[in-house]
Amino acid sequence: MLRVLNDNWVETEGPVGVVNWTNEEGARFPVSMMGSGVWAGNRGLRETYDLREVGAGGDGSKRATVRQELERIGYLGDVPARVQDGGMRMAGHFELHIEQGPRLLAMKKRVAAVTGAQAYKWFEVHVYGRACHSGTTPMRLRADPLAYAAGMIFQTNRIARNSGVLMSVGIIKAEPGSVNTVPDHVMFTVDARAETDEELGKFEETFRTQTKGALMKRNNTARKDGAADKVSMEIRETFHSPAMNFDEIAVGLVEEAARDVLRAGDGQAEVPRMISGAGHDSVNTARHCPTAMVFVPCKDGVSHEPREWCEEADCAVGTDVVIQSVLRFDKWRHEQGHFAG
C-alpha cells in the first residue's frame, strides 16, 4: 500500500504508516494480541516482559521471556510502549486479513467489511491426582487426573455445542509423563468464543458448575470404592478479550471502497458484513481510534496450518480496498477539520 502511494506521488493530509504488532497470535508467548494489548493499556509492560514462551513442563526457568528475546534480537528500545505513556498515537487503524474460515467462499464473495470481533476467553484447567504404578494399582483405587480430564473435555465440548459457543482444547500435558505411570497432574487449555459477552459468560458459568459437580460425583464414587485419594481441580482464566464493535464510519468507508474496487474488477458490488471469529490487533486499536478490517477468502477456509493459502488476485483486491479505505478516511478527517490550523 505504501509503495503504491509513494510510486504514484499520492499526497495525503495526514501521515500514513505501517505497524507490525508483536506476538498477535499468542503462539510462542501465551497471550493473544500481546503487543497491541500493551500499547492499548490492557496489559502491564512488566508482566508482559516476564511472560515465558510455551514449552515443556517443569518450572519453566529454561524457557525464554519476552524481555530476554527482545534483548537478544536488539528490539528492546526506549520508546514508550503504551499510548497512555506517550507512545505511538493513531488517528485510525485498517487491517487486511484472510477470513480464516469458509463463509466468503460459500457466499462466492471476494471481500467483506468486518464489523467487529467476537468475545473469547482462554483457560488453563489443572487436574491433580496421585501418581502410581499402572500395573499394580487396581482401577477402582486410582486417583487418575487424566481419566477425569478426558471426561471433562468431552463434557465441555458438549456444553459448547448445546449453547452455540465455539470451544477447543489446544494443549494437553500429563506429568510425570511415563508410559507405565498414572499421572498426578494434568493440564489442558480451553479456548471458548461467542459473538456476545453474555453468551460467553453463560457458557463459562455452565462449564464451571457442571465440571465441579462431576468432580464431586467422581470423588464420592471413588470413596465408596475404597480409594484413599481424591482428584482435585483448578480452573485459571489466562486471557480475556471482550466482544468489540468497530467504528461505524470506518466500516462504512471499507464498504464504499470495496464496492468501487469490485465494480472496477468483476462488477460484483455486493459487500457482506462479517463478525470476526478470531482475535486481531484491531480489537485493541478500536479502544483508542476508529478501526475497521477487510477480509479476503482463504483456500477451503483453512487457517493456522500449512495448507493456509490466499490467491494472489484476492490479495490484490484486499490491498486495493485497504488503500481506498485509508484515502477515504484521510479525506473524511480533512472534512471534519482534523488538520485545521
Image (tube, grey):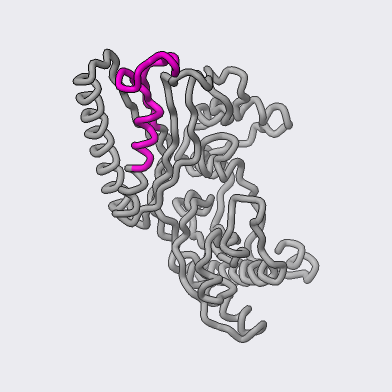
For residue 315, side relative to residue 177 (left or right):
right
Percent x, y of residue 304: 59, 50
Instruction: Find residue 79 and report its horizontal and vertical position in percent.
Output: 63, 36
Front residue of 22/87: it is 22
**In this picture, is 278 found above or below 35?**
below
Q: Which residues are magenta?
A: 125-154
Measuring from the top left, give residue 264's x and y in whole percent: 66, 84
Q: How many marks?
A: 0
Look at 52% across and 54% down and name the residue there.
282
Q: Is residue 86 visible?
A: no
Left-right relation of 46 to 162: right
Please tell me whether residue 232 belongs to the stretch shown in magenta.
Answer: no
x and y percentages locating residue 192 in the rendered image: 39, 46
Question: Which quadrant of the figure contains the N terminus?
Answer: bottom right
Residue 269 visible, this orientation = yes
Between 228 and 163, the one lying in front of the other is: 228
- Residue 130 lies in what quarter of the image? top left
Judged left or right of residue 20, residue 10 is right
Most foreground residue, 144 or 125: 144
Q: Quadrant of the C terminus?
A: bottom right
Quarter where residue 239 is shown: top left
Asked whether residue 153 is drawn in magenta, I would say yes
Residue at x 44%, y 29% (from the top left corner) = 187
**Is residue 141 toward the left or the right of residue 190 in the image?**
left
**Residue sitting at the far right:** 7
Which residue is rendered at x = 52% and y = 17% of the image?
A: 59
Nearer to me, 5 or 331? 5
